[in-house]
Amino acid sequence: MSEMPLSETRLSDPYSNLLSHSASVPFTMDVEDPDIHTDGSFVEVVDQVLAWLETEKKPGSFFIVGELAKNYPAMVRRISEQGHELGLHGLEHVPVNSLSEQQFSTDTQKGKNILEDISGKRLSGYRAPMFSITAATPWAPGILQSLGFSYSSSVLPARNPRYSMSDAPQAPFLWPCGLLEMPAPVTSCLGLRLPFLGGIYFRYFPNRFIENALARLPDDQAPWFYCHPYDFRFGKKYIHMRDTPLWVNTLLMLNRRRAFEKMKKLFAGERASITLAELANKHQLKLTGLTEAQ
Ligand SMILES: [Zn+2]
């Protein structure tokens, strides 16, 4: 397997915590900067998150846009040196289907190299911008595998106006090429599949709804939390986002003031005790029927 930051204790039982969603919900952040009037203030939010994780002694998984990493290498080093997982969130923050197969391959390799060169660590996880691995990009998982990624968390198995695979499995699954997919967690509500554990969904749903959804998740699923720097309001009151209609921009700016405190409540206790790479590794072992000794 890849050089993931796995501790001996965590590896001793590859199936431990698989059935305990409360213990294993990894914390993940997509580090991107959609601000038209960018001034790099997203770094301040990342640093606040790092300070919180350090206080709580929890690991996180940070999926970073390659071009952004190139411009903010010190931030990448801080994340890495604190022991967190680094993953790639595209070379640029563009949907996968806007690239040709060849361009996706070239760009993803470039982005991976940037993060690996800065951190000196090998990446194992990839997350497509906007969950944009869909039926329209059947070549993407094979390319990720050939570039050395161990897992992807790029699929939203619910209906969504932008990008989704509404008929994809909700539990971790293997693509035909063998790459592991860790789909975004969704809950069933009034017969619909609904994302609930990240971004705007987490900010708008009460924690009680989120806790109930987590408690009702089938055992084979692997919930993980995701957020972006813009989900939290530190300093900058309004961010005008690129390629975003005004009404969507307004929705994205509301409910940010208390989002950080709300997230802290969600992660009080045992949650986020492992990275997404570690959870992926457990599911990889389960799905391939391998044991650690093999
Ligand atoms: Zn993103």
Image (cartoon, rainbow, N blue to C red):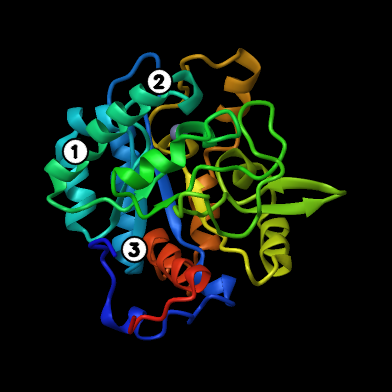
Counting residues from the N terminus, which is met first, the one under dot 2 or under dot 1?
A: 2
Query: Which residue type carries mark 2?
Result: Asp
Q: Position of residue 129 (x, y in %)?
A: 46, 32
Question: Which mark, by number, is residue 129?
Answer: none
Number of other residues with Cα within 10 Å of mark 1, as a class: few under 14, some 14 to 19, many 20 or more: some
Per the model, the C-alpha gap separating discs 2 and 1 is 25 Å
Q: Which dot marks residue 59?
A: 3
Residue corresponding to mark 2: 35
What residue do we see at 62% from left, 64% from top? 221
Reply above or below: 38 against 274. Answer: above
Element carrying mark 2: loop
Instruction: Identify the residue position indicated by label 1 in the image.
Output: 113
Q: Is residue 162 above or below residue 285?
A: above
Q: Left or right of 75: which side holds 137?
A: right
Q: What is the distance, in whole Å, between disc 2 and disc 3 at their CAs?
A: 27 Å
Is 250 placed left or right of 217 in the picture? left
Q: Is residue 269 visible?
A: no
Residue type at tag 3: Pro
Viewer-side residue, 256 vs 184: 184
Count of all numbered marks drawn on residues in the image: 3
For badge 1, the amino acid type reads Asn
Q: Quadrant of ligand 1?
A: top left
Is the residue marked 3 within 8 Å of ligand 1, measured from its CB?
no
- Identity of the residue drawn at 23% across and 61% down: 83
Please name the residue shown 36% across and 47% down the image. 145
Task: Choose top left, top right, bottom left or bottom right for residue 150.
Answer: bottom left
| Residue 100 shows in this picture | yes
